[in-house]
Image (tube, grey):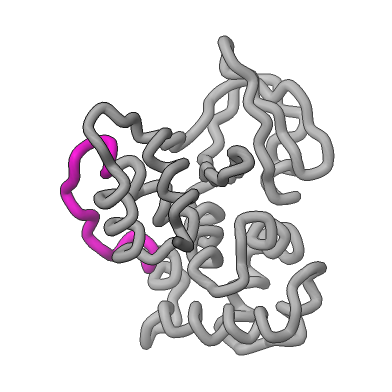
Amino acid sequence: MIYSLTGKIEKIDDNTVVVDTGAISFEVCCSTFTVFMLAGKTEPQTILTYLQVREDGMNLFGFIDKKEKLLFNNLLTISGVGPKLAVSVLSGLPFEDIFNAILKGDVKLLSSIKGLGKKTAERIILELSSKMGAENSLDSLLSASSSTTKPVLKKEIDEAYEVLVSSGIAKAEALELAKNNYTDGMTSEQLVLLCFKNLHK
Protein backbone atom coordinates (compact mmCIF):
# COMPACT_ATOMS: atom_id res chain seq x y z
CA MET A 1 0.00 0.00 0.00
CA ILE A 2 3.03 2.26 0.47
CA TYR A 3 5.36 1.30 -2.38
CA SER A 4 8.04 3.92 -1.78
CA LEU A 5 8.88 7.20 -0.04
CA THR A 6 10.66 10.19 -1.53
CA GLY A 7 11.95 12.97 0.67
CA LYS A 8 14.84 14.40 2.64
CA ILE A 9 16.59 12.27 5.24
CA GLU A 10 15.71 14.10 8.43
CA LYS A 11 17.34 11.78 10.95
CA ILE A 12 19.28 8.50 11.14
CA ASP A 13 19.54 6.49 14.36
CA ASP A 14 21.00 2.96 14.26
CA ASN A 15 18.63 1.06 11.95
CA THR A 16 15.99 3.78 11.83
CA VAL A 17 15.68 6.46 9.15
CA VAL A 18 13.24 9.37 9.28
CA VAL A 19 12.12 10.52 5.82
CA ASP A 20 10.53 13.96 5.53
CA THR A 21 8.18 13.82 2.53
CA GLY A 22 6.96 17.37 3.10
CA ALA A 23 3.62 17.04 4.82
CA ILE A 24 4.56 13.93 6.79
CA SER A 25 7.77 12.47 8.23
CA PHE A 26 7.95 8.67 8.19
CA GLU A 27 10.02 6.55 10.57
CA VAL A 28 11.42 3.61 8.61
CA CYS A 29 13.34 0.55 9.81
CA CYS A 30 16.24 -0.20 7.44
CA SER A 31 19.23 -2.50 7.12
CA THR A 32 22.67 -1.16 8.01
CA PHE A 33 23.50 -1.17 4.29
CA THR A 34 20.56 1.09 3.44
CA VAL A 35 21.40 3.35 6.39
CA PHE A 36 25.00 3.58 5.17
CA MET A 37 23.88 4.47 1.64
CA LEU A 38 21.53 7.19 2.93
CA ALA A 39 23.88 8.73 5.50
CA GLY A 40 25.04 12.20 4.62
CA LYS A 41 22.64 12.61 1.71
CA THR A 42 21.25 16.15 1.50
CA GLU A 43 19.15 15.85 -1.66
CA PRO A 44 15.77 14.03 -1.64
CA GLN A 45 16.09 10.24 -1.67
CA THR A 46 13.69 7.49 -2.73
CA ILE A 47 13.49 4.26 -0.74
CA LEU A 48 11.30 1.27 -1.44
CA THR A 49 9.07 0.22 1.43
CA TYR A 50 7.22 -2.68 3.03
CA LEU A 51 4.32 -2.01 5.39
CA GLN A 52 3.72 -4.45 8.24
CA VAL A 53 0.21 -4.19 9.65
CA ARG A 54 -0.58 -5.74 13.03
CA GLU A 55 -3.31 -5.36 15.62
CA ASP A 56 -1.01 -3.31 17.84
CA GLY A 57 0.17 -0.96 15.10
CA MET A 58 2.02 -0.56 11.82
CA ASN A 59 5.73 -0.73 11.03
CA LEU A 60 7.41 0.56 7.88
CA PHE A 61 10.56 -1.08 6.50
CA GLY A 62 12.75 0.55 3.85
CA PHE A 63 15.20 -0.61 1.17
CA ILE A 64 17.76 1.21 -0.91
CA ASP A 65 17.02 -0.81 -4.05
CA LYS A 66 14.77 -3.46 -5.58
CA LYS A 67 17.36 -6.19 -5.06
CA GLU A 68 17.37 -5.73 -1.29
CA LYS A 69 13.57 -5.55 -1.09
CA LEU A 70 13.09 -8.72 -3.14
CA LEU A 71 15.50 -10.67 -0.95
CA PHE A 72 13.62 -9.33 2.08
CA ASN A 73 10.33 -10.56 0.57
CA ASN A 74 11.86 -13.98 -0.10
CA LEU A 75 13.08 -14.21 3.48
CA LEU A 76 9.54 -13.53 4.72
CA THR A 77 8.34 -16.71 3.00
CA ILE A 78 10.47 -18.75 5.41
CA SER A 79 8.73 -20.08 8.52
CA GLY A 80 10.02 -18.28 11.60
CA VAL A 81 11.33 -15.23 9.72
CA GLY A 82 9.46 -11.98 10.34
CA PRO A 83 10.27 -8.49 9.04
CA LYS A 84 12.62 -7.57 11.89
CA LEU A 85 14.64 -10.77 11.56
CA ALA A 86 14.75 -10.33 7.78
CA VAL A 87 16.24 -6.85 8.28
CA SER A 88 18.77 -8.35 10.72
CA VAL A 89 19.78 -10.86 8.04
CA LEU A 90 20.24 -8.06 5.50
CA SER A 91 22.28 -6.15 8.08
CA GLY A 92 24.41 -9.11 9.15
CA LEU A 93 26.25 -9.78 5.88
CA PRO A 94 26.77 -8.12 2.50
CA PHE A 95 24.09 -9.07 -0.01
CA GLU A 96 26.47 -11.14 -2.13
CA ASP A 97 27.66 -13.09 0.93
CA ILE A 98 24.07 -13.93 1.89
CA PHE A 99 23.40 -15.13 -1.65
CA ASN A 100 26.59 -17.22 -1.77
CA ALA A 101 25.85 -18.73 1.65
CA ILE A 102 22.44 -19.84 0.37
CA LEU A 103 23.93 -21.11 -2.88
CA LYS A 104 26.73 -23.07 -1.18
CA GLY A 105 24.67 -24.25 1.79
CA ASP A 106 26.94 -22.47 4.25
CA VAL A 107 24.86 -22.80 7.41
CA LYS A 108 27.76 -21.73 9.61
CA LEU A 109 28.17 -18.37 7.85
CA LEU A 110 24.45 -17.66 7.70
CA SER A 111 23.84 -18.61 11.34
CA SER A 112 26.66 -16.27 12.40
CA ILE A 113 24.19 -13.42 11.88
CA LYS A 114 22.93 -12.15 15.23
CA GLY A 115 19.45 -13.48 16.04
CA LEU A 116 19.50 -16.13 13.31
CA GLY A 117 19.60 -19.67 14.71
CA LYS A 118 21.01 -22.72 12.96
CA LYS A 119 17.61 -24.29 12.23
CA THR A 120 16.25 -21.11 10.67
CA ALA A 121 19.43 -20.71 8.63
CA GLU A 122 18.99 -24.27 7.38
CA ARG A 123 15.37 -23.53 6.37
CA ILE A 124 16.46 -20.40 4.50
CA ILE A 125 19.08 -22.36 2.57
CA LEU A 126 16.74 -25.25 1.84
CA GLU A 127 13.81 -23.17 0.63
CA LEU A 128 15.56 -20.28 -1.12
CA SER A 129 18.18 -22.40 -2.89
CA SER A 130 15.32 -24.28 -4.59
CA LYS A 131 14.07 -20.94 -5.99
CA MET A 132 17.37 -20.26 -7.72
CA GLY A 133 16.65 -22.79 -10.44
CA ALA A 134 19.04 -25.09 -12.20
CA GLU A 135 21.28 -22.16 -13.17
CA ASN A 136 21.72 -21.16 -9.50
CA SER A 137 21.26 -17.59 -10.63
CA LEU A 138 20.69 -14.53 -8.52
CA ASP A 139 18.00 -13.37 -10.95
CA SER A 140 16.05 -16.60 -10.38
CA LEU A 141 16.04 -16.06 -6.64
CA LEU A 142 15.05 -12.42 -6.86
CA SER A 143 12.26 -12.97 -9.37
CA ALA A 144 10.72 -15.84 -7.40
CA SER A 145 8.55 -13.54 -5.29
CA SER A 146 6.97 -11.90 -8.35
CA SER A 147 6.46 -14.97 -10.55
CA THR A 148 2.82 -15.62 -9.67
CA THR A 149 -0.21 -13.90 -11.12
CA LYS A 150 -2.17 -11.61 -8.82
CA PRO A 151 -5.91 -12.24 -8.71
CA VAL A 152 -8.29 -9.56 -10.01
CA LEU A 153 -10.38 -8.35 -7.06
CA LYS A 154 -12.46 -5.43 -5.81
CA LYS A 155 -10.10 -2.51 -5.03
CA GLU A 156 -10.31 -2.75 -1.22
CA ILE A 157 -10.00 -6.55 -1.27
CA ASP A 158 -7.11 -6.34 -3.71
CA GLU A 159 -5.19 -3.86 -1.55
CA ALA A 160 -5.80 -5.89 1.60
CA TYR A 161 -4.70 -9.04 -0.24
CA GLU A 162 -1.41 -7.36 -1.20
CA VAL A 163 -0.70 -6.35 2.41
CA LEU A 164 -1.52 -9.81 3.75
CA VAL A 165 0.70 -11.55 1.20
CA SER A 166 3.57 -9.11 1.77
CA SER A 167 3.25 -9.87 5.51
CA GLY A 168 4.05 -13.53 4.85
CA ILE A 169 0.56 -15.02 4.70
CA ALA A 170 0.06 -17.69 2.04
CA LYS A 171 -1.67 -16.34 -1.08
CA ALA A 172 -4.64 -18.72 -0.85
CA GLU A 173 -5.22 -17.88 2.83
CA ALA A 174 -4.77 -14.14 2.18
CA LEU A 175 -7.36 -14.23 -0.60
CA GLU A 176 -9.86 -16.11 1.56
CA LEU A 177 -9.35 -13.76 4.51
CA ALA A 178 -9.75 -10.62 2.40
CA LYS A 179 -12.88 -11.85 0.60
CA ASN A 180 -14.60 -13.33 3.67
CA ASN A 181 -14.00 -10.32 5.94
CA TYR A 182 -14.98 -7.61 3.48
CA THR A 183 -18.30 -5.78 3.73
CA ASP A 184 -19.55 -2.93 1.52
CA GLY A 185 -18.24 0.48 2.51
CA MET A 186 -15.18 -0.89 4.31
CA THR A 187 -11.81 0.74 3.56
CA SER A 188 -8.77 -1.38 2.73
CA GLU A 189 -7.13 -0.33 6.03
CA GLN A 190 -10.19 -1.46 8.03
CA LEU A 191 -10.24 -4.73 6.11
CA VAL A 192 -6.56 -5.43 6.78
CA LEU A 193 -6.98 -4.87 10.52
CA LEU A 194 -10.05 -7.13 10.62
CA CYS A 195 -8.21 -9.85 8.67
CA PHE A 196 -5.34 -9.84 11.14
CA LYS A 197 -7.82 -9.91 14.02
CA ASN A 198 -9.54 -12.97 12.57
CA LEU A 199 -6.38 -14.64 11.24
CA HIS A 200 -6.26 -17.50 13.74
CA LYS A 201 -9.97 -17.85 14.46
Residue 9 in the image: above or below residue 115: above
Residue in the picture at 75% in, 50% down: 32
Q: Quadrant of the C terminus?
A: bottom left
Q: Is residue 198 found left or right of 15 in the rendered image?
A: left
Residue in the picture at 57% in, 18% down: 21
Does the magenta segment cover residue 146?
A: yes
Does the magenta segment cover residue 1?
A: no
Q: Looking at the image, which residue sits at the far top?
A: 23
Q: Position of residue 39 (x, y in %)?
A: 76, 34
Residue 91 in the image: above or below residue 138: above
Residue in the picture at 46% in, 34% down: 2
Q: Position of residue 46 (x, y in %)?
A: 54, 31
Quadrant for residue 190, please give it.
Answer: top left
Residue 193 in the image: above or below residue 98: above
Q: Quadrant of the N terminus?
A: top left
Q: Is residue 86 found left or right of 194 in the rendered image?
A: right
* Extent of the magenta region: 144-157
Q: Is residue 18 found left or right of 134 in the rendered image?
A: right
Residue in the picture at 55% in, 36% down: 47
Q: How many marks?
A: 0
Residue 108 in the image: above or below residue 141: below
Q: Nearer the viewer, residue 117 or 71?
A: 117
Q: Nearer the viewer, residue 88 or 184?
A: 184
Q: Position of residue 25 (x, y in %)?
A: 64, 20
